[in-house]
Image (cartoon, rainbow, N blue to C red):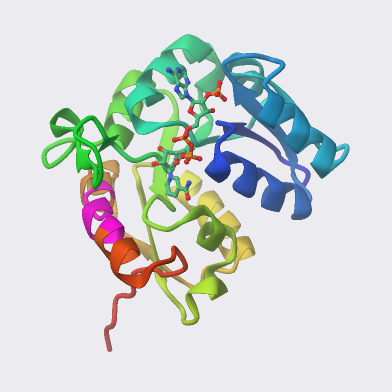
Amino acid sequence: MNKRIAILGTGTAGRTLGKKLVQLGYQVAMGSRTADNEKALAWVSENGPNASCGTFEDASRSGEIIFNCVKGEITLEVFRSAGSEHFKNKVIVDLSNPLDFSNGFPPSLFSQWSNTNSLAEEIQKLLPEAHVIKTLNMVNCEVMVEPSLCGADASMFICGNDAASKTSVMNILQQFGWKDIINLGEISSARSMEMLLPIWVKMRMLIGNSHFGFKIVRP
Ligand SMILES: NC(=O)c1ccc[n+]([C@@H]2O[C@H](COP(=O)([O-])OP(=O)(O)OC[C@H]3O[C@@H](n4cnc5c(N)ncnc54)[C@H](OP(=O)(O)O)[C@@H]3O)[C@@H](O)[C@H]2O)c1
């Protein structure tokens, strides 16, 4: 295996996914705005020789598969600044959400990236030679890498235009422990996946913790 993975983002999602991917045997490079980001340096020292960090551009250059774990509203800016040449023919796993906190909590969705559009589609338009795959955005990051925390087999959605890329991401999801993976088809299905966030936030408020998921029941 020994695939090189880039994690763009030093938040809880990036650090949690990065740790799990290192444990699974991948080489993981974490990217941030600055090469000496404190959270990234601490994450590297905690995760051993297969963990490294640098700028968004450094990480994107080295990764064969790139996980987008940055704040939704600046996602496109981050991809633009990292340099489009680093994403050619690569898989981008997008788990960002277009959450708008400008009016406080609970957040709404940015109208330009919802309903008839999505962040994942905008990334795909920005980087037409990359293969954007949307998944994992509708669960908390601890659940992403340990779905059994939900207490039952939750469903995980995935979509994207390139079948082979989707298969390789499904393989990573299986390594995380996901069993019920539902392929929603092309990248435009990211609209519905990102629009799950308002109900996720509502459930988080009702349940009082983040260890839950969505389950599709069917015969
Ligand atoms: N946390 C979760 O459990 C979870 C679950 C599902 C989906 N997600 C999605 O995953 C993404 C990351 O979430 P998170 O909570 O881990 O972290 P976050 O706080 O949303 O994002 C952290 C990252 O955003 C970058 N960033 C923030 N402002 C920036 C700016 N103006 N310009 C460039 N970069 C900027 C930071 O860069 P620096 O590294 O330079 O500081 C950092 O790497 C979000 O889109 C979120 O919706 C998160």
Q: Residues in magenta?
A: 194-201
The percent coordinates of residue 120 (x first, y second) are: 32, 36
Residue at the spot 74% in from the left edge and 37% down from the top edge:
43
Percent across and percent down for residue 129 are 42, 23
Quadrant of the drawing holding the C terminus: bottom left
Q: Is residue 31 above or below residue 147?
A: above
The quarter of the displayed image where residue 173 is located: bottom right
Residue 181 image offset from top left, x and y in percent: 43, 66
Decide which of 130, 35 is in the foreground and name it: 35
Res. 51 image quadrant: top right
**Depth check, front residue: 211 or 59:** 211
Judge from the rendering whether residue 71 lies leftward or rightward of residue 20; answer left or right.
Answer: left
Nearest the viewer among 217 and 86 is 217
In this view, the residue farthest toward the bottom is 219
User: Most prominent secondary structure in the magenta stretch?
Assistant: helix
Count of numbered marks? 0
Residue 142 visible in the picture: yes
Residue at screen point 39% across, 50% down:
137
Q: Is residue 209 above or below residue 32?
A: below
Quadrant in the picture for residue 66: top right
Residue at the location (56% across, 17% down)? Answer: 86
Is residue 87 one of those drawn in magenta? no
Q: Is 195 covered by the magenta stretch? A: yes
Vertical order, 108 against 180 (above or below)? above
